[in-house]
Amino acid sequence: MKPKRLSIAAATTTVLVLLLVGLLQLMSFSGETAPSTLTLTQMRARLIGSPPALVALHAQANEILSGGLPALRARLAALRGTPVVINKWASWCEPCREEFGVFQRASVSLGREVAFIGIDTDERSRAIALAFLRSLPVSYPSYYDPSGQMGLAITDSSFTPVTVFRNRTGSLFIHQGPYPSVAKLEQDVRRYALGT
């Protein structure tokens, strides 16, 4: 019986090793690795030197702001002339959760040129959203939208996730669905928000 147990254990180990190697090859084939989590301190350090309007956003990093649509519209008016990326998300939305690390990285790498803002939509409570943000912080605030009406007004979509890009002249581009990689999100930020 002992030889049989050893062969089952060896077969199980072999299968696990092959799965791990396959996953690593798949990740290198796609050109992306999973984004690692940055702390708020690391994000703030990388965003030093941002323009004042963006410094104000970075000071509210990882917060869930109240005030609804009027507060968000006032913030967008204050950012007129600044490229903006608005991401509508929810902690219960699995594609949103999967892309959150992508937004974390892109908001840090492009956060000195572009304002990032979140809309936490259709969330049962702020506490749930804040608990999620503690596990994966971002360098920008999100506005609390329990009814989903703010997200609908801004993104013109009832789906989640949705990302809105606003360039310096106020032109909008709306991307529906999750971003699979930092490279793809940064490409769209440069194209639709920065116009490069």
Image (cartoon, helix red, strand yellow):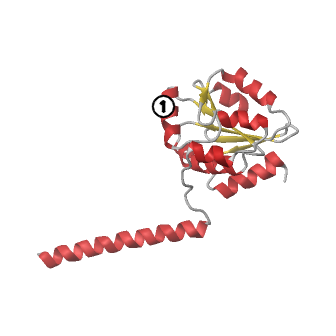
**In the image, is 182 to the left or to the right of 79?**
left
How far from the left and from the top, in percent, is residue 60?
64, 32
Give the side of residue 129 with respect to residue 142, left or right: left
Please state which amino acid type lies under the numbered disc 1: Ile
| Residue 156 visible from this viewpoint | no
Residue depicted at x 77% and y 34%: 53
The residue sitting at 57% across, 55% down in the picture is 35
The answer to which image quadrant residue 139 occupies is top right
Quarter in which the C terminus is drawn: bottom right
Picture quarter containing residue 147?
A: top right
Quadrant location of the N terminus? bottom left
> Element under label 1?
helix
Q: Position of residue 2 (x, y in %)?
A: 13, 76
Residue lying farthest to the bottom in this orientation: 3
Measuring 53% from the left and 38% from the top, which residue is drawn there?
133
Percent x, y of residue 145: 61, 26
Q: Is residue 83 visible?
A: yes
Residue 132 vs 75, above or below: the answer is below
- Along the line of sight, which residue is nearer the eye, 16 or 45? 45
Q: How many marks?
A: 1
Q: Which residue is mark 1?
A: 128
Q: Position of residue 31 (x, y in %)?
A: 62, 66
Tell me which residue sits at (68%, 30%) in the image: 152
